[in-house]
Amino acid sequence: MNKTMVDLVKATKIYPPDVAALEDFSLTVDKGEMVFLTGMSGAGKSTVLKLISGIEPPTKGLVEVAGKDLTKMKAKEIPAFRQQIGMAHQDFKLLPDRTVAQNIGMAMEVSYENFRAIRNRVNELLQMLKLEHKHDTQTEKLSRGEQQRVAIARAVANYPVLILADEPTGNLDPVTTELVMKLFKQYNDAGSTIIIATHDEHIFQNTTHRVLELANGRLIATRPTLQP
Ligand SMILES: Nc1ncnc2c1ncn2[C@@H]1O[C@H](COP(=O)(O)OP(=O)(O)OP(=O)(O)O)[C@@H](O)[C@H]1O
Ligand SMILES: [Mg+2]
């Protein structure tokens, strides 16, 4: 069985008209790995996650995820492909006039067979992220940190094989950050591959996982993995 979950080979992304967000960027992530992407604002972290999720096509280079070459995938195949991936966007992308439960449950309608299973799963996630009391609140009425946790809950709701988290702790206090990182660890221990883009050095300073640093759309350093 192929052990690679993500393979970017010399991926370049030029946003129109001429913004080079990524240049010749290569990254291989094995199934079951957890990897941190770091680097200054504008370095290209979100772009890497957008290429992997198929939101943006590369201008050049190869993007392979779960054995599929995304550059060759037909547009109509992309929705089914995305079902396997849980993405927590940097700007959350929640439906503002829908409730917390609706935002999370909506992601599950394709893969969960009945309403009760969805309801139980939503409640479980809200409990884990300490948001039970916001179950029926429209997401536009939430604080940024609460919205962020809803985005994370939605991303992991389907037990995706690949979780992409873009600045998942950017709006959280240290206690809530720890809660979210514990959640990611649980999913990683259960087998999900996780890629986290972050400025927050605290969340990876003691990690045993790979930390890749980007600058100006290029990989500039891979921090040595600390011994477990
Ligand atoms: N849709 C777009 N159109 C044009 N330029 C873009 C677009 N998205 C990103 N860029 C540019 O591409 C570069 C990389 O952006 P990206 O969002 O990947 O960086 P980042 O490392 O995630 O930054 P941050 O830490 O601020 O989130 C930046 O120069 C940015 O301005
Ligand atoms: Mg970003």
Image: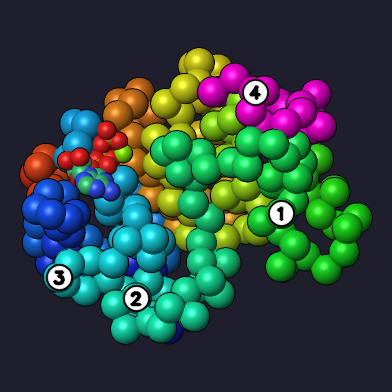
Asked if residue 160 is positioned above or below residue 134 in the image, the reply reads below
Q: Is residue 142 left or right of residue 194?
A: right
Which badge, 1 or 3, comes first in the chain's sequence? 3
Residue 160 location (% of width, % of height): 57, 60
Residue 80 location (% of width, % of height): 56, 74
Q: Which residue has dot 1 on it?
A: 106
Mark 1 lies on a secondary structure that is: helix
Q: Which residue has dot 4 on it?
A: 142
- The stretch of residues the image draws in magenta is 129-145
Q: Which residue has dot 3 on it?
A: 60
Q: Which residue has dot 2 on it?
A: 70
Question: In which quadrant is the C terminus drawn?
Answer: top left
Which badge, 1 or 4, comes first in the chain's sequence? 1
Which of 96/153 is in front? 96
Check disc 4 and give the amino acid type: Leu
* Residue 191 seen from this side: no
Which badge, 3 or 4, comes first in the chain's sequence? 3
Q: CA distance from mark 1 to mark 4?
A: 18 Å
Check disc 1 and give the amino acid type: Met
**Residues tagged 1 and 2 counted as in contact (Cβ below 8 A):** no
Give the residue at x 54% y 32%. Answer: 148
Give the residue at x 27% y 71%. Answer: 63
Mark 2 lies on a secondary structure that is: helix
* Residue 101 seen from this side: yes
Q: Residues within 10 Å of mark 1 (few under 14, many from 20)?
A: few
Q: CA distance from mark 1 to mark 2?
A: 25 Å
